């Protein structure tokens, strides 16, 4: 009986790992590199903040949106975007809040580069903290 329980636990653990790994591989990850005309920076940041908050609260497939700027050139912005999959991304770019952001910031953007990325490893500190407690 002990062998059966151990085997079931091992198989369940392996299945959970494989499922988690597959989900990470399915994610769509992108880095958007945006250069904003400096005179529009504050207005742009207002549009961006509204769009990110709406995306994270209204769209379950939008997993992460981290917006940051270069230390010395605040008008150079990078956004790390993580979506559950390409379907979630495709739905995201059709939402009213994204379209408002996109059309509202067109004149503000000097350049845009979209870099599609592939995951190597996704870990969170809280995951490691829970293991040590």
Image (tube, rainbow, N blue to C red):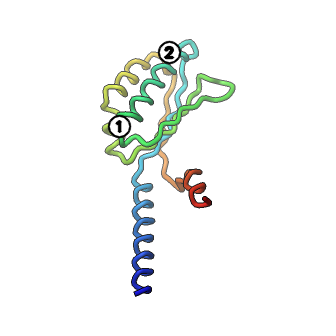
Q: Position of residue 95 (x, y in %)?
A: 31, 30
Q: Position of residue 99 (x, y in %)?
A: 34, 25
Q: Is residue 109 left or right of residue 90?
A: right
Q: Nearer the viewer, mark 1 or mark 2?
A: 1
Residue beneath the point at 44% across and 55% down: 24
Give the crowd class for mark 1: few <14, some 14-19, many >=20 residues within 10 Å: some
Rendered-image quadrant of the N terminus: bottom left
Residue beneath the point at 40% across and 69% down: 15
Q: Tell me where residue 38 sits by quadrant.
A: top right
Q: Position of residue 29 (x, y in %)?
A: 46, 45
Give the crowd class for mark 2: few <14, some 14-19, many >=20 residues within 10 Å: few
Q: Specify the label residue 68 is tagged with.
A: none
Q: Is residue 95 left or right of residue 37?
A: left
Task: Determine which residue is flagged by label 2.
Answer: 43
Q: Is residue 43 left or right of residue 129?
A: left
Residue beneath the point at 43% across and 43% down: 63
Rendered-image quadrant of the C terminus: bottom right
Q: Secondary structure at mark 2?
A: helix
Q: Secondary structure at mark 1?
A: loop
Task: Determine which residue is flagged by label 1.
Answer: 59
Q: Tell me where residue 51 sits by quadrant.
A: top left
Residue beneath the point at 40% across and 71% down: 12
Tell which residue pokes out farthest to the top in this image.
Answer: 39
């Amino acid at each position: 009986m002990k062998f059966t329980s151990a085997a079931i636990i091992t198989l369940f653990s392996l299945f959970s790992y494989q499922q988690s790994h597959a989900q990470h591989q399915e994610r769509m990850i992108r880095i958007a590199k945006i250069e904003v005309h400096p005179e529009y920076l504050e207005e742009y940041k207002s549009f961006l903040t509204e769009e990110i908050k709406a995306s994270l609260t209204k769209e379950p497939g939008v997993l992460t949106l981290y917006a940051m700027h270069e230390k010395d050139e605040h008008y150079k912005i990078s956004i790390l975007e993580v979506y559950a999959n390409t379907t979630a991304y495709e739905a995201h770019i059709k939402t009213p809040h994204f379209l408002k952001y996109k059309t509202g910031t067109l004149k503000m953007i000097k350049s845009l580069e979209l870099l599609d990325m592939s995951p190597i490893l996704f870990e969170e500190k809280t995951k490691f903290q829970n293991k040590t407690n």
